[in-house]
Image (cartoon, rainbow, N blue to C red):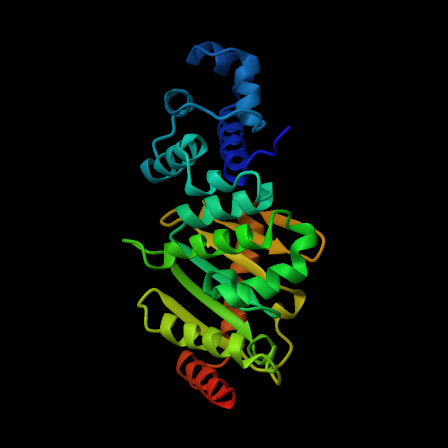
Amino acid sequence: MAVSTVRRRRLGEELRRLREQKKITAEAAAEATGMSQPKLNRIENARTAAKIEDVHRLLDFYGCDDDEFRAGLIAITKDGSKRGWWLSYRDVINVTAKDLITLETDSSTFRTYEPAFIPGLFQTPEYARIVIERLRSRMGGTVDDLVQVRMARQSILTRPNPVEVWAVIHEAALRANANRPDIMGPQLDRLLALNRLGNVNIQVMPIGAAVHPGMGGAFALIGFSPRRDLDVVFVEGLMSTLWVDDPTDVERYRARFTEITAEALTIDASIDFIAAQRETLK
């Protein structure tokens, strides 16, 4: 059975929370909204995609009068039924990658700390290839297909109403592969070009920085303004990944990212650092 997407799980959790706040049983909610109790249970447990009309009826019955919150849940519902470009690669990418791409595509902001690699949204095809070749054992698919997917993801940076991306990249990631100037040179050029986009901010975490929360590992905070309580965090490890969607925990990561940006070089100093590193590869 396919794993439900993160946002579908979030929709079910929010609908259950609203129902329980009103002290309404699942049986009563199902009867009042014209659906079976098993269907409502499947929606709340993220075992089936909800229909927009069902969500509207449930929100009406629960007395939800927060228009922004309602709009956010309806947007999640629409996402569950729409077809994305990544479906062409459904036999190539795993469920985690599909969830990440879905969330990236629908997000308004993307904040990430990366201690080891250039973030995927910034990678050149050549750089992406060497990273994917080393990590392919847990990705599945061919290297060529996975590189294509990674390049396609980057369209969110330049589309109309692009995603606002703020990335903090550790100095070590920028200095890696110095023996491959044919790969790292164009990659650093790519970072410098991206910095000229109004929706992209890049900072460098220097090797000599003080202890900071980023030392715990890479993570990405994916935002869906104006409702911060629908934001999620993606934590990727070598052998497993973790989705964090509890609002309290997400706020902790938000605070951690603020601390990380404060410890990193300023944006101007970071661009100077990247440019200087690029010069060493000529």
Looking at the figure, which quarter contains the N terminus?
A: top right
Residue name at image x 40 percent, y 25 percent = 59
Q: Is residue 21 left or right of residue 83?
A: right
Residue at point 58%, 81% (across, down): 175
Residue 178's x, y, as percent? Answer: 59, 82
Find residue 192 and report its horizontal and vertical position in percent: 40, 76
- For this rendering, which residue is in front, 173 or 34? 173
Residue 10 as seen in the image, left or right of residue 74: right
Tell me if 276 is positioned left or right of 135 in this view.
left
Q: Position of residue 158 (x, y in %)?
A: 33, 59
- In the rendered image, residue 279, in percent from the top left (x then y), is placed at 47, 89
- Hey, which residue is sitting farthest left in the picture? 160
How many badges with numbers are in the image?
A: 0
Taking the spot 50% from the left edge, 68% from the top edge, the residue there is 258
The correct choice, above or below, for 137 with respect to 191 in the image is above
Toward which corner of the image does residue 275 lie, by quadrant? Answer: bottom left
Q: Residue at x 41, y 20 (%)?
A: 54
Indicate whether 163 appears above or below 259.
Answer: above
